[in-house]
Amino acid sequence: MSAFLRSYGPLLCGVCVWLLALVPARPAEAQKFGRIEETQTNTAYFYYAQPGEATIQIYVWGSAQPGIYEIPDSTSLSRLLTMTGGVPRGQRQENEEPARIEVRLYRPEASRETPVLDTRARRVLEGTVEAPTLQENDILVVETIRQTQFTWRDGVSLTSTALSLTLLILRLLDRR
């Protein structure tokens, strides 16, 4: 066998090189994750699943980190809120009430006007509200609602507006 390899070895190597040269070259491909190729958008796309795991796409809008989230189909709503960076709290002034964070979940197949879930984010995260199971193409809207307080500036603005309107009416009546 060794005599055979010594005499025909270089020939066999040359034939192998020629055969490899005849095989058409293909570009290298990495493993594909998610369905980002199907998504024609310029919004953020987040993929939170293991390769081969069944996933669903959820659209997140509002004051959370918006975008398209591809997540495992077993993900809970509280976990999705955590994936979006949590609920935004923002800064508040002294003696100011904390912002109210509302969470609404819409099912496009059911109705785009009526949410499947409409509650405070705190209740979802505490587990006091039973959130529905997330489904493909659900829309999650996270909205921050700040309570505004009536300040002295608001009072001055209302007073000056009322006085201006009174003067305008008096001038119009005097011209007659």
Image (tube, grey):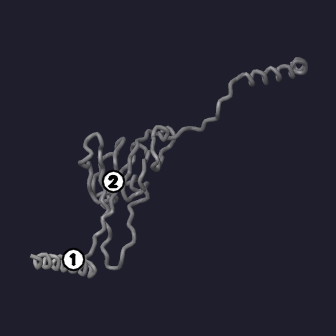
Q: Position of residue 116 (x, y in %)?
A: 26, 48
Q: CA distance from mark 2 to mark 1?
A: 37 Å
Q: Nearer the viewer, residue 29 or 127?
A: 29
Question: Which comes sooner in the sequence, label 2 or label 1?
Answer: 2
The quadrant where residue 19 appears: top right
Q: Residue furthest left?
A: 176
Query: Which quadrant does the N terminus fall into?
Result: top right
Depicted 58 relative to depicted 151: above or below: above
The image shows residue 65 at horizontal and vertical percentages of 42, 56
Residue at (83, 22) in percent of width and height:
14
Left or right, 173 with respect to 53, comes to left
Looking at the rendered image, the disc whose residue lies closer to the viewer, 2 or 1, is 1
Amino acid type shown at disc 2:
Val
- Residue 10 - label: none
Say which residue appears at 28% left-offset and 39% top-offset: 109
Instruction: Report which residue position mark 2 lands on.
Output: 141
Q: Which residue is mark 1?
A: 161
* 29, 37: nearer the viewer: 37
Q: Secondary structure at mark 2?
A: strand
Residue in the foreground of this view, choosing between 74 and 1: 74
Q: Residue at x 30, y 59 (%)?
A: 102
Q: Which of the 4 image quadrants contains residue 93?
A: bottom left
Judge the density around disc 2: few (<14), some (14-19), many (≥20) Cα neighbours within 10 Å: some
